[in-house]
DNA sequence: CTGTTAGCGCTTTCAG
DNA sequence: CTGAAAGCGCTAACAG
């Protein structure tokens, strides 16, 4: 195909050639019932002959005030966003949902430089936005809001009441995993988490720091687990975080935690990716899981099940489908210029503990010590 | 945010309120050097006060004939497309490339129903398309072509000369893996591949069928391996394919192949996902890899390296970046109404064999038999 | 079933 | 530095 800006005609030019009105040609594409099948065929044939493939989507969108695309804002570079398998499942759920079937998904690549991304957000040609798991104070959310288009927030920020929300109850969701460790008799447990604050930081953090976290999801998961531990009289739980959730970071986090606290008998992770880091670190260092160390994850991605990780299943695909449905309704209401039925639903989807083979009671000797 | 269709003003309304011309307001956003900083500030402030977040992207695109988005056509349901980790790496590479940084990526969800998807393609508001790994006769490609926008083809179809192409030489790429198996002394080898034809089919296929395959990539990988095997006097290589490349399909494929041919000492897979299926099937059936069975993959996804799979590394991220660069140049040329430098580059990216721990010589007893 | 009218909101010459 | 004019290509009433 020549990339030459071939003039392929317009609705008007086709109409002129055939001696019919523009409306008729438009109807041939958009309202087939408004003209005779013969005429329609004739028009479509003439269009095809001239290389005209239907009304220009841009002009049509401008006229109808509707694009047929949902913007998706992921606030990490794509390679990191995709590292997190949960976000892929979410996207697949959104894309496969019947509500998204009639829409495309516009991924807005958001880098560390706020300015550029903000620009992209304010110029994206979309009908609405999905804001996926961003910090409470994230400027990208503000940029999306300023567009005045429908928005659905996924996972976080949690505290925003005037916007639709779809997510889980992270505080409660992680507790069964924490409880399982306690019930098995573990007393020296460490926590591995993804970043709790927007800024770059890797290392140990205190409970007080967790409480001020920008990122609701990680904060609640940690606090949910700590709540269980404290009720069992466990304090002094070391917490190590990593800004990124990719495999090298996870292995490194495991190393930092386990070297600093060799006496741990269990590690609770707030993401499956972190847990894989622990598993692989242990494998490399001849630490038997669950013999020497119990491990739990969070997310329930496919690989977690394949590797037998004990984790919390989060219905990511279903989250995607739910988001598609809500956003679609909002966009429709807006285009039809009427009040939506429910402008800001708050949907909390249930989670379940998935028992794998990575949790066992600590060895007797360790339990006594 | 009320989803009410709040009237947030237009460029014209702001201009009227301030008693300046529309051009001036437009310039405040698009050509800051064309007016005094004071005036610009004043305009921006007034806009902010009225909740006007800048020129409407739709109207602007219509006027400038440019959207700022690349359409990406993946011809599988998103959940399956994403199952294939290679496509995720590709997308990440595209999104992270500096060429895509100024563009969004519009994913066009393409289901099994050709009609709907074709519709979505002909109405997508984008500047060009990336067509990712589709069959030679795929109607989605035709739909994209009929838009008259720049297109870059990734991986396949290979035979199209008038469109830019970015991919690898699949025939040669897989040969080092095949050669490694032969050199280790394997004589009874099976092949596991993803579908070779667009239609739904799971099972054994013949070499003759492979030769008529719609899907160039899988065909070439199989033929490349067969070429090596035949040169070593090996014939009767069983080939089993699956329509989908997800984990359950892969395990099932492994079962079918190994149960039908229990004497195999090696399995060459045309994707890493297939190889993971073999590894997990073997684990479940106490077949030692590589002691009892050697396995090779193809793609070089991260998990392959983590699991020590011997595979062929394909630079998916780099493919994405290359595609972004080409498409960006094409779109620019088109918008500026000039001939592109190279309208249809054909880029073949080199691959490398990655040695893992899943290939060994067959046991002596087996070698003799 | 067909045509006329009236913009959608913006950018871009080109004068002033 | 500012403004007036001229559309980009289309669709939605509405009247025939």
Image (tube, coloured by chain):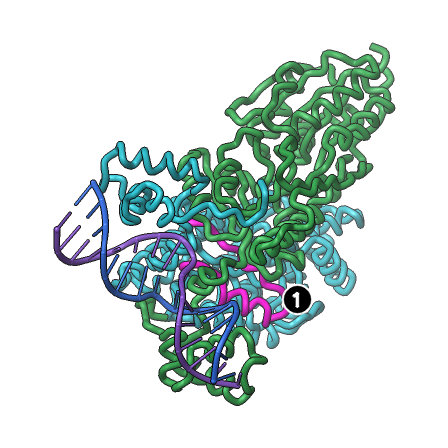
Chain colours: A green, B cyan, C purple, D blue
Magenta range is B103-127
Label 1: which residue? B239
Task: Work out whether A211 lies above or below B27.
Answer: above
Q: Is residue A141 above or below residue B368?
A: above
Quadrant for the N terminus of chain B in the image: top right
The quadrant holding residue A196 is top right
- In front: A343, or A189? A343
Where's residue A273, x and y in %? Answer: 65, 35
- Crowding around mark 1 (Cα neighbors within 10 Å: few <14, some 14 to 19, many 20+) is many
- Where is A258 relative to B92, above or below? above
Q: From this viewpoint, is residue B290 visible?
A: no
Q: Nearer the viewer, residue B183 or B126?
A: B126
Instruction: Give residue C6's position: percent from left, percent from top.
Output: 40, 66
Question: Residue at horizontal 71%, vertical 45%?
Answer: A302
x and y percent of residue B57 in the render?
A: 42, 51
Instruction: Look at 39% across and 86% down and name the residue there.
Output: A19
The residue at the point 57 percent across, 25 percent down is A197
Q: Is residue A267 visible?
A: yes
């Amino acid at each position: 195909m020549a990339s030459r800006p071939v003039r392929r005609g317009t609705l008007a030019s086709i109409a002129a050639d055939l001696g019919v009105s523009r409306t008729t040609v438009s109807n041939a594409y958009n309202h087939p019932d408004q003209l005779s099948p013969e005429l329609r065929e004739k028009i479509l044939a003439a269009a095809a002959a001239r290389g005209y493939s239907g009304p220009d989507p841009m002009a049509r969108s401008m006229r109808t005030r509707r694009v047929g695309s949902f913007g998706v804002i992921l606030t990490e570079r794509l390679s990191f966003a995709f590292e997190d398998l949960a976000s892929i499942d979410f996207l697949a759920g959104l894309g496969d949902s019947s509500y998204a079937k009639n829409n495309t998904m516009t991924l807005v690549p958001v880098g560390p430089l706020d300015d550029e991304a903000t620009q992209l957000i304010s110029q994206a040609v979309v009908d609405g936005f999905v804001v996926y798991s961003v910090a409470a104070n994230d400027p990208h959310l503000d940029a999306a809001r300023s567009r005045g288009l429908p928005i659905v927030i996924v996972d976080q920020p949690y505290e925003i009441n005037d916007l639709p929300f779809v997510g889980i109850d992270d505080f409660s969701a992680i507790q069964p995993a924490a409880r399982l460790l306690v019930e098995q008799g573990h007393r020296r447990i460490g926590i591995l988490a993804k970043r709790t604050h927007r800024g770059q930081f890797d290392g140990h953090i205190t409970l007080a720091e967790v409480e001020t976290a920008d990122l609701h999801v990680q904060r609640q998961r940690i606090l949910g687990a700590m709540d269980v531990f404290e009720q069992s009289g466990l304090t002094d739980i070391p917490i190590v975080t990593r800004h990124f959730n990719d495999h090298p970071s996870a292995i490194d986090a495991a190393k930092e935690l386990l070297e600093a606290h060799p006496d741990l008998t269990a590690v609770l992770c707030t993401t499956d990716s972190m847990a894989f880091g622990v598993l692989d670190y242990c494998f490399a260092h001849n630490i038997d899981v669950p013999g020497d160390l119990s491990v739990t994850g969070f997310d329930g991605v496919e690989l977690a099940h394949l590797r037998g990780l004990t984790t919390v299943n989060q219905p990511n695909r279903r989250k995607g489908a739910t988001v598609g449905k809500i956003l679609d309704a909002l966009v429709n209401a807006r285009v039809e210029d009427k009040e939506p039925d429910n402008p800001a639903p708050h949907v909390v989807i249930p989670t379940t503990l998935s028992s794998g083979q990575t949790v066992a009671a600590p060895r007797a000797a360790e339990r006594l010590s």
